[in-house]
Image: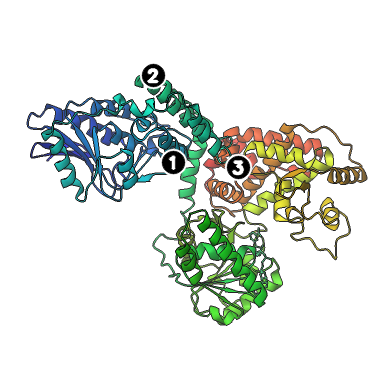
Amino acid sequence: MVAVSNMADLTVEDGVAVLTIDNPPVNALSAGVRVGLTEGVAMAAADDSVSAMVLICAGRTFIAGADITEFGGASTGPSLHDALTAMENCSKPIVAAIHGTALGGGLETALVCHYRVADAKARFGLPEVNLGLLPGAGGTQRLPRVVGVAKALEMVTSGVPIGSEEALASGLISEIVEDLRGGAIAFAKKVVAENRPLVRIRDQNEKIDEAKGKPELFAAIRKSIARKTRNFKAPEFNIQCIEAAVNSASFDEGLTVERSLFTELMTGEQSAAQRYFFFAERMAQKIPDVPKDTVEIPVNKVGVIGAGTMGGGISMNILNVGIPVTIIETKQEALDRGMAVIRKNYENTAKKGRISQQDVEDRMGLLTGSLNMEDLADCDMVIEAVFENMDLKKDIFGRLDKIVKQGAILASNTSALDVNEIASATTRPESVIGLHFFSPANVMKLLEIVRGDASSNEVIRTSMSFAKKIGKAAALVGVCPGFVGNRILAQRQYQAQKLIMEGAMPQDVDKVLFEFGLPMGPYQMSDLAGLDIGWDAEKSKGETIRDVLCEAGRRGQKTGAGYYDYDENRNHKPSAEVEKIILEFSEKSQNVRREIDEEEILARCIYPMINEGAKILDEGIAIRASDVDVVWVYGYGWPIYRGGPMHYADSIGLDKVLAKMKEYGELTGDAFWEPSPLLVKLAAEGKGFKDFAG
Ligand SMILES: NC(=O)c1ccc[n+]([C@@H]2O[C@H](COP(=O)([O-])OP(=O)(O)OC[C@H]3O[C@@H](n4cnc5c(N)ncnc54)[C@H](O)[C@@H]3O)[C@@H](O)[C@H]2O)c1
C-alpha cells in the first residue's frame, strides 16, 4: 500500500489499482482528496502492471460533496476541475465503487469515471441547489448525458437524491454489487478482459440529442417549481445549465456556461445567505451551558392535552416516528372530532401517495384518545395544547404534577405565556419547559424550545434531541412575552397597523412583504390565522379596526371575509368595505393620509424586527443571532436566500439599519423607534450581529 496523500492510498491487486479515499466523516473533497485523485490516477497510469483502476472510499460513504468549509476562502492543492480532467483523460479505465451517498462534487467525481458500480443502498444526487448553487464541476453537463434531460432537470432543481435501483435503470451505474470492493475489482477486470471502451460521458450525446428542439421539457419543469422556488436564483440557473448542455455546439461550450453561472451564484448574496443558514441550523444545536453528555430521558410514550388545531398536529409528528400518543380532551365530541381530523390528514397524505394505507393504520393504531388525565400517568413527556389562558394552563399543570410519574417532561405549547409561571403550578419546575410548535404543527419545521428558569439540563437536552427525532429544527430561547418569534412578529404587526392608518392599504403592505420573499404579508396572515384569536366579543367596543371587522363578522378566511374578501376557493381580493373602515379610522385619529412608497413600507416593517432581535440578544433570550434567524426562516417562512432578519441586517450594514431607525423616529416622533443599545454599539464598532457573542 502506498500513501498517495494524507487522505488517499493506493494498492495494486491482480492488475487493478485500488485508490482509497479516506477523509472522515464524509470524504469531502478537501485539498488532500483532490491531491489523492490527481496523483493516484497518475501513479496508476504510469504503472505498467496496472490495467484498470477502482476508486473507492473508506468509512460510511463515497465522496459526499465539496468541503463546504473551503467555500469563500482560499483553497490549496489542485482544483477539482483539474483533478476531474486528469481522471476523465486517464488512458486506463476507472471504475467508481459507490456506497453511502455520492452527492454534489462526489457524484461529479463519479461522473468522470468511465464506469460506476454501487451497493444496493447507495444514493446519488446533486443537492447544490439547496445551498443556492449549481454543480460547478461539470455535473450539469454530464448528468443529462447519462440519465436524460428530464431526470437530470428533476435532480438538479429538487436536490433530492435517487437510489441504486433508479440509478441502474437510468444508466447512471452499470451494476449493483454485494461486496463493493471485490465486486468493483471484478467489474474492472471484466472491462479489461472484454476490451470495453473507455466511456467518457462528455462524448456521449445521444440522450441530449433526444431533447434538442423540445423547449417544452424546460417549460414544464419551470412551471412545476415556480411557486416553491419564487425569487430563488439557483433553480433557474441549474435549468439554464442543462439547456446549455442540450443547445451548445460542444461539451466545452456548455461547461463555460456552467462555470459562469456557477460563479455568479457563488459570489452572490443568495448563496451566501443559504450557506450561512446551513451552519446556523447546525449551530443552534449547541447549548453552551448544557454539556453534550447530559443524560437524556427516554421518550417512549407521549401525552398530548387538547385535540384542537395544535394538539392534533403535534400528535401527528410523534406518531410519524412510531411513538405512541395518548390525547386528552374534556368532551367526547371534541375528542372524536380531533381524532377524525388526524385520520383525515393521514388519509389525504396516503391519497397523494406519500404514505401507504398501512402507514395510516399503523399511525392511528399508536393513538389513544381519552377523557381522563389519569391515563397520562406513565407518559415520559406530556405536551399541553389547550386554550391560551394562564389560569387554565396552571390548573392543568397542577393536576399533571399529581398524576404523571416523576422524571417525565411536562411541556406547554403556549405561544406567549410565562413558562416560569406555568411551572410554578407544579412542585417540579425543573421538569417543565415550553415546546412551542408552529401552525400547522405537522408541517412547520420550527420548534421553539423555551427554557424556564428552573428547566433542568436533562429536560433541555432531551427536548433538543426529541425535536430532531420528530424532524424539527430546534431553537432554544428564554422566557419573555412571545419568546423570540412572536415577540419580533409583534413589532412588524404594530408598524403594519400604523401604515394603514397613515396612508397604505392592507394589500399595499402585503404586496411589499410578499415580494420581499415572505409567503404572505401581515394582513393575509391575520386572515389565515383568524382575526378573532385573542379577541373578546363581550368586551369589544369597536375601538380598533380589528374590533370593527370582527364585530361585522369579518373574522378571516374561515368566515369568507377579513381584511380581504374571499371567494369560495379562498382566493383573496381587496375589500371596498375594509378600505372604507380604514379611512374612517384614519380620519377619527386625525391622521393626514399620505402616499407611502414601497421602500418605506419595507423599512418600517423589517427594521423594527431587527431592532427587536437586537434587544432579544442583549437580554440573553436567544443564545446567538443565528438562532433568531432559524426561528424566522423555519417558523415564519422568512426567505432562506436572505438568511434571516439578523443576517439580512448584517448584509445591509448595521450603520444603515441604525440610520433608518433614527430617521423614522424623527419622522413619526414615536418612541417605538428607539434603537436597541446593542444595535448602537455594534454599529459604532463597525460590527455585525454575527460578531455578537453573548
Ligand atoms: N393556533 C396556532 O397557530 C398556535 C400556534 C402555536 C401555539 N399555539 C398555542 O397552542 C395552544 C392551543 O391552540 P389551538 O390553536 O390548538 O387551540 P384550539 O382551540 O384549536 O384547541 C384547544 C383544544 O384544547 C381543548 N381543551 C381545553 N381545555 C382542556 C382541558 N382542560 N383538557 C383537555 N383539553 C382541553 C379544547 O377542547 C380544544 O379542542 C394555545 O396555547 C395556543 O396559544 C397556537
* Quadrant of the snapshot with the N terminus: top left
Residue 546, given in percent of the width and then of the height, sits at 81, 53
Would residue 330 be seen by someone viewing this image from the given angle?
no
Can you identify the residue that label 1 sits on? 159
Image-quadrant location for residue 655 = top right
The residue identified by callout 3 is 645
Q: Secondary structure at mark 2?
A: helix
Mark 2 to mark 1 CA distance (whole Å): 24 Å
- SS label for mark 3: helix
Residue 691 spot, x, y in % from top left: 52, 41
Q: Element at badge 1?
A: loop
Would you say the beta carbon of the disc 1 residue lies within 8 angstroms of ligand 1? no
Q: Residue at x 12, y 37 (%)?
A: 16
Residue 202 placement (x, y as % from top left):
31, 26
Quadrant for ligand 1 reads bottom right
User: Do tag 3 and tag 2 residues touch (Cβ < 8 Å)?
Assistant: no
Label 2 crowd bin: few (<14), some (14–19), many (20+), radius 10 Å: some
